[in-house]
Structure formats: structure tokens, C-alpha cells
Amino acid sequence: MAGPETGVLAARARALAVLRIRGAALGVALLPAAVAVVLLFGCATGRFGAAPGWGVACWTIGALAVLVLLLAALVAVVVARARPALSPSVPVAEKSAPDLYRLVRDLADRLDVPVPSAIALTPDCDSWLEDRTHPAHAALHRTPHPADGAGRPSGAPVLVIGSPFLWWMRVAELRALLAPVVAGTGPSAHPDIAAARRFIRGLDAAAAVPARPRGPLRALPLRFTGRIARLLLRACRDHATLMERGVAAAASERARTVDYGLRIVAQEQVGLAYAGWDRLLTRVALPAWRMGRWPSRLDAGVVSALTELSRRDRLAEGFASRLGERPACDLLEEPGTFDRAASLLAARLFHGGPAEAGPDWSPVGWHQYPQEVVDRKW
């Protein structure tokens, strides 16, 4: 059976291919300058003879080289300064969830991989690692959050956990499900893979820059850089896809040593949580959002609905026994505060509501929902 190193080697090979494309692009940018240097040297030393055509060629190639270098510098600056897309999430400080951080650290120790630098919650049924080392993101991670207290400098990568998982899963199930995700910090720390990812993220961010409103003087050069970025992205696309597959394969293989059997069983809960979350958003939350109210305990709501289903549905009889185990949300010091923040973020992401509560955008608890939403709707 292939070990995790096989996936890392495959990912590194693709990362080197991406870096070779970067090097080739740099070589193309420097080629006119190299030709200009050769011509200028030949003209200065008289090796090309006294023909007047050589002087014109030297000046023409020199001007072209300067233009190409300026354009290359413009592309490099835009790629370096463009802010990569950042997934909206609720930051979780260690003092707000010491048990959760301890679980992740223990998991990383068992997997023999680096520990994620921070944890965040997202109102979605998914979990992933996100690199937030770009300078544009540093200030964001130092910004205090109401539930977190003081911010702290960020590192890479950040572990983003789906909030429905944290509320519906038991502690052991969450640890089993997070094992392949946390295991991804190992390949992510490889210098070649990290460099290739930074290059891809920079190109992706640069390709999106021209879409932002700009003045006419800045729009033209930014459109040029956007085209170059998209051209390089197309050249790197297949290699980047296979690189990420190799990273995922390596992480999955390494995670087989931790709670593998429990993870197979817990996958059933993933599907159940996804179905419950989707139904809650479309059937319950959406009518409230349209009326200017946002349910403030969405995660608790999906747990209540799935718990009721587990108790009455014969197909879910095997799930009922797990309800007596410790829920993963107990790893948070104040679950209600994070549930409220995740619920507001869900309303902003899935409905386009304001980022803050206001007179026309107020929270509603489940005990108020029948009177505030159902009665008003019907």
C-alpha cells in the first residue's frame, strides 16, 4: 500500500512543474534584455562592424527590452500585492476554546504534522485548511472579535471547521473527521508545495483585480496584468489540480493511523448534518431573512431537528445512542456566542444581509420564531 510519502512526492513533482512555468515566464521577460545586452556589447566593441543598421537594431531592441521589463515588473507587483480570496469565517481564539485547541494539538501530535496556527468557524458543512499568511490578511487576524478577546498574529494554515459539524458531531467523531484535514499541514509545510501554492493564489488574485472599479488610467494596465495572470493560470491548471490531489492523498493516507474505523462510521453523520443544514436554511431561515429577521441559533436549531429525527425515525435508531455522548460544541467556552456569530454570517453569505444587526435586521430566537415569522408570514 502506498504511504503518505508517495502522495507528497507526487505533489512535489507537480509543484516543481508549476515553479518551472513561473521560471519560464521570468525567462521570457528577461530574454529581450539579454539580447539587448549582447547587441550593445557588440556595437560598443565594434564586433558587428560599422554598418549603421546595427546601431538602429541596438536601440530598437534596447527600447523593447525596457518596455518588456516594465510590463513584467507591473505584473509582478500586481501579483505580489493582490489580496487572495479569504473565506468568510468566525475566528476562534484559544482562550475561547482551550479544549478545542487541545484536541487539534493532540491530533497533530499523533499525526506527526505541524499544528494549525488558528481555528475558525464557517456556516457550512465542510472543513479545510486555509493559508492566511498574505500581508493583507495579517491585520485582519490581529483584529479582536467579540467572542475571542484580543487578536493575535496569524500563521499558516488556519483550520476552518464547519459550525454544523461542531454542534452535531460528538467529540470523538469530530476528532476522526478532522484527522485528514489536520494531516494536510504536513504537505503544506513543504517549501516547493508552499511556493507553488503562493504563486497560484497570487495569480488567481491578480486575475480578479481588473473586475474591481478603477479609474480609466489604471484600468488599461490592470486589464493587461489580468490577461497575463489568466494565461499563466491556464498553463498551471492541470499541474495545480494534480498537486492538490497528491496533497489530499498524502493527508488521507497519514490519517488512516488515527480513528480510521470511527471516521467511516462518522461519515454517515456528515450526510445527515448536511441534509439537516440545507433544509433548515431553505425552509426555516430563508423566510425569516426575507422579513428582515435572522435566526440567531441556527446550529442549535439543526441539532434540535436532527435529534428529534434520530429519536423517532426507525432508520436512525442506531444514531440515538450517540446523543448521550459529549457534543463537540462543548469544546467552546461560550457556544451560544459563536452560534450567534455563525448565524449572522450565514445570513450574510446565503441571503446578502447586513454584516451587523440593526433596526431592519434584528435577531430572532427559536421561541419567538412562531410569532415573529410564522404568524406574520401566514
Image (cartoon, helix red, strand yellow):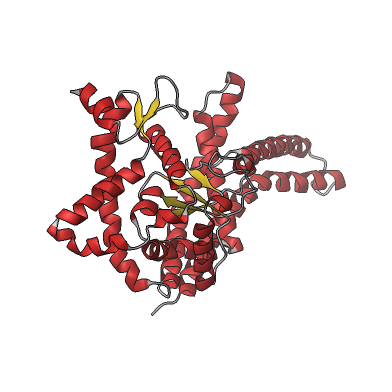
Q: Residue 312 versus residue 47: which sits nearer the camera?
A: 312
* On-image quarter of the C terminus: top left
Say how many tags the image has. 0
| Residue 283 visible | yes
Residue at image x 64%, y 45%? 29
Q: Quadrant of residue 377?
A: top left
Picture coordinates of residue 82 (x, y %)? Answer: 59, 38
Looking at the image, residue 65 sits to the left or right of residue 102; the answer is right
Residue at the extreme left? 314
Residue at image x 15%, y 54%? 312
Q: Quadrant of residue 169?
A: bottom left
Residue at image x 14%, y 55%? 313
Q: Residue 352 versus residue 31: which sits nearer the camera?
A: 352
Q: Quick check: 29 above or below 330?
A: above
Residue at the extreme bottom? 1
Q: Quadrant of residue 301?
A: top left
Q: Quick check: 290 above or below 339?
A: above
Picture coordinates of residue 317 (x, y %)? Answer: 18, 62
Picture coordinates of residue 92 (x, y %)? Answer: 52, 48
| Residue 184 visible | no
Q: Residue 358 versus residue 125: which sits nearer the camera?
A: 358
Q: Quick check: 175 above or below 54?
A: below
* On-image quarter of the N terminus: bottom left
